[in-house]
Image (cartoon, grey):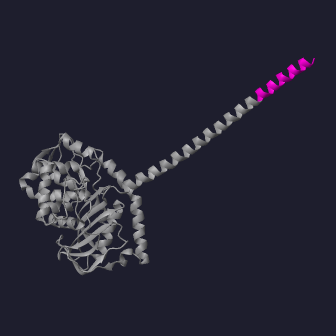
Amino acid sequence: MSDLRKEDDLRWLQILQEKEQRRAKRRRQVLIQKILLGVFVIAALSAAVLLTLGVQDKKQKQGRQDVAGVAPNTATESSTVVTNEESEDKEHQKEENLTQSQQTAGRDETDQQTSVPVQENSSSIYQYQENTRTLGKGILSSHAVLIDTDHKTILACKDETERIVPASMTKVLTLLTAAEQLELADLDEKFKITVEITDYCYVNECSVAGFQIGEKVTVRDLLYGTILPSGADAAIGLAEYVAGSQEAFVKLMNAKLEELGLSKTAHFTNCVGIYDEKHYCTILDMAAIMEAAFENELCRNVLSARTYTTAKNKKHPEGILLSNWFLRRIEDKDTGGEVLGAKTGYVTEAGNCAVSYGADDKKRNYICVTADAPGSWKCIYDHVKIYKRFSKRK
């Protein structure tokens, strides 16, 4: 009897142990499920945060795109331009409101500038004066200068002698070098766009005018396509037409820098503005290049054009409408005069930059150059502020 009871007790104890093991196993499963659920929730939250940051970063990069130098890439140019314009309207409106509020409060930070002493600058054709001003924090570009071209003097400046990456401002020298090699009869000559040109633009992520492989375009179209939409396809085509290759053309560009007296502080390695450690200049150099370009009638006409339609052909039966967006965006701003011509640029290493040629209401001439602005509209507003405050000073 006692043996049977012991056997029953052992069996019952075994059942209890099995139940406890099942409970422990269940608790482990629940714990694992909770851990997995927690990991999933954390992963989902992390993904949402990264997505939000990615969208914000993309918007910031779009805000830094070259006004004219990041042009549409294909025949869908018109719709792409509209999209880019809409994406920048908010930034424009914020800048407009900020400028108005500063003017109303009478506390534009450009009023806080101080004079710099007269100094010699052997590497530049421009001279400082006793009342040359140092630009303050109201100008967001890291480098800026305003030149009085009539008197070859520096009216206002900020890190003007430091080396910069000229980005697509390079194409002003491309235009000038080509124009000086061309005859009037060349302008209507045709040049065939090759696959090598389009591949170069694609590989280097260049802005383009929109010419297609095999398209025969006029040299005049190449000139305007180089400047208005900052087209690398047009610039390389121009270089090959003039010199046979981009490499040979770059030699002509550097020879022009030497002729202008800029070879000590400027050197270019390509005709497009692609970043290269050996591709550099100062904003004073860029001002001198712009002044030389405006002294050439053909260059002046190209740099001053708001829009231009290329010649009709089989690839583009209606031609391609090109626009200089910097000129079109600044033309309704109060600069105290008129901006007559301009070329912008953007690469990551340069930020947003621009060189412009302006005149006040008494037809006195100026050149403004800025580099490393944190956005395309901010680059424009730096030019507006500098022209309005300093263009009438002597």
Could you say where residue 313 lies in the image, as x and y percent from the top left? 17, 43
Q: Quadrant of the C terminus?
A: bottom left
Q: Quadrant of residue 167?
A: bottom left
Q: Quadrant of the N terminus?
A: top right
- Is 75 positioned to the left or the right of 266 in the image? right
Measuring 51% from the left and 49% from the top, which residue is drawn there?
Answer: 49
Measuring 41% from the left and 71% from the top, which residue is drawn there?
Answer: 100
The question of residue 2 being in magenta is answered with yes
Q: Is residue 258 visible?
A: yes
Residue with the most extreme bottom position: 130
Could you say where residue 12 lies in the image, as x and y percent from the top left? 83, 24
Q: Quadrant of residue 29?
A: top right
Q: Quadrant of residue 385?
A: bottom left
Type of secondary structure dominating the magenta stretch: helix
Vertically, is 373 above or below 137? above
Q: Is residue 363 visible?
A: no
How many marks the image carries: the answer is 0
Residue with the most extreme front position: 3
Could you say where residue 280 lies in the image, as x and y percent from the top left? 23, 59
Could you say where residue 135 lies in the image, as x and y percent from the top left? 32, 74
> As rendered, which of 81 and 355 lies closer to the eye?
355
Q: Which residues are magenta?
A: 1-19
The question of residue 243 being in magenta is answered with no
> As rendered, which of 53 and 71 lies closer to the eye?
53
